[in-house]
Amino acid sequence: MKRSRILMAATCGALAIACASTSIAMVHSTSVLAAGMFVDHKARAQTQTQASAQPWWAGFEDTAMNRLMAASQGTTESGVAAAYIALKVKTLELLYLENTHAAVVRQSALLQGSTLPHDDFAKQLAARQASAETTIGKLKAQRANYITYLAAQCHMSEASMNEMLADALQDKALPRFAAEVPRELPMSVLSNRNDINLAAALYGADPAAMPAGVIDPTDEAPGIEVPGEPPYAHAVVQAREQVAGALHRLQMQSDIANTAYTRVMNARAGFEASKQHRDRGDISEVQLMEDFQGPLLDLHVLAAANGELALAWVVLMGSIGNGASIDAVAGARSAQAEQLPFLHKVSRKLRNP
C-alpha cells in the first residue's frame, strides 16, 4: 500500500503540473512587436520605432529561442525556431509517455496472481507496455536528432547545447506567439515581402501603394485591382494567396489547439472525480491507473497541437516577409504531423478486479 501511495503521489503530481502549465492556445496579451506586424501601413508608423529593432521571433517572448538565434548568427532562423519547437514538443511527449508507461507497469504488478473478469486485459497491458517502450526509444532518438541539428546550426557541441537548453526543456510550457490570431490582415503587409519589392523594382511600381482592403482567407475570389504592369499585379495576387493560406492554417491550428485544451481540462476534472471514487473504495487502483492514462493521452495531443500552432506562426511570419523561410519549417512540420503510434484506447468503464 505504501508503494502504491508513493506512485500515486508521483503520477498525480506529474499530471497536476502538466495541466497547470498547459496554457490555452489563444493569448490575450499582445506585444508591441506583434501589434506592429498586423496593422495597416499608415498606422504601423506609430509602433515602428519600438518594433523595428526586434526580429520576428521576439514575438514568441522565449528566452531560449532568443539565445539559439543569437548563437546561430542569423543562419536558417526559421529552421532553428522550428527545430526548437519540435524539441520542446518531443520532450513533453516523452514525459507523458513515461508517466503512461509507469501507470501500465503498476497495473500489471497489481494484477499479478489475480483472476481477471476480462481475460484479455493482461494481454492489453503487455501490448501497451511494449508499444510505450518502443515509442520512448523513438522519441529519445528524435530529441537527439533535434539537439544535433541545433548544435550544428549554433556552432557548438551537443553537450553545450544540452546545457544551454536544460532549463527550457524542464519548463513544460511551449513557445507561444504573443498575439491573438488575426481574422484578417491588411493588404499593406505584402509591401514587406522581398518578392514584392523585387517585382516593384523590375516594373517601376511602388510597393507601399498596395490596394485597399484586407487579406481574408475565407474570401476565395477577392476583387483586387493592383496598379502597375501585369507581372507586378500577378506577383501581388500570388503573394496574397500565400498569406491567405498561411493565415487560414494558423486559424485552423488555433481552433484545434483550443479544442485540445478544453479536452485536457475536462479530462483533468474527470480524473479528480476518479481519485475521489478511489478514496471511497468505489474503484480499484487498477481502474484509477486506467483513468490516469486518459488525461495523459489528451495532454500528448495538446502538446502536438500547440507545437503545430507555434509552427503556423513561424510560417505566417515568413509569408508576410519577416525573414522567416516557409520552406525551412517543412521538416519539423513533417515530424510534428506524425501519428502517435503508442496512443492506445484506455477503458472508460469501471473495473474492480
Image: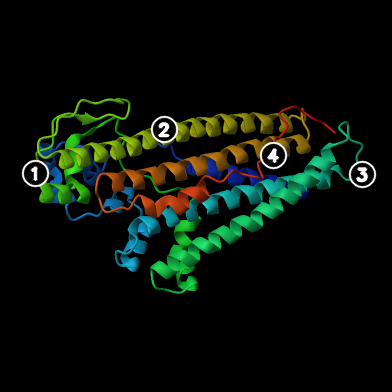
Q: Residues within 10 Å of mark 1 (few under 14, many from 20)?
A: many
Q: Residues within 10 Å of mark 3 (few under 14, many from 20)?
A: few
The mark closer to the camera, 2 or 3, is 2
Type of amino acid at the residue the image marks with label 3? Gly
Tag count in the figure? 4
Q: Which residue is mark 1?
A: 205
Q: Type of residue at label 2?
A: Met
Q: Position of residue 349 (x, y in %)?
A: 74, 27
**Residue at x-position 10% and y-position 35%:** 227
Figure quadrant of the C terminus: top right
- Amino acid type for the residue under numbered disc 4: His
Instruction: Decide if residue 158 is on the left or right side of residue 59.
Output: right
- Secondary element under disc 4, as helix, strand or loop, is loop
- Three-letter residue code for mark 1: Ala
User: Where residue 190 sits in the image (x, y, percent)?
Assistant: 20, 41
Q: Which residue is mark 2?
A: 252
Res 4 seen here: no
Q: Residue at x 56, y 29 (%)?
A: 266
- Marks 1/4 in contact by CB < 8 Å: the verdict is no
Which label lies toward us, 4 or 2?
2
Q: Secondary structure at mark 2?
A: helix
Q: Secondary structure at mark 1?
A: loop
Disc number for residue 123 = none
| Position of 218 relative to 74 (above/below) | above
Name the residue beneath numbered marker 4. Answer: 344
The residue carrying pointer 4 sits among few (fewer than 14), some (14 to 19) or many (20 or more) residues within 10 Å by Cα, namely some
| Disc on the earlier residue, 2 or 3 | 3
Residue 27 is situated, as x and y percent measured from the top left of the image, at 35, 37
* Residue tagged 3: 113
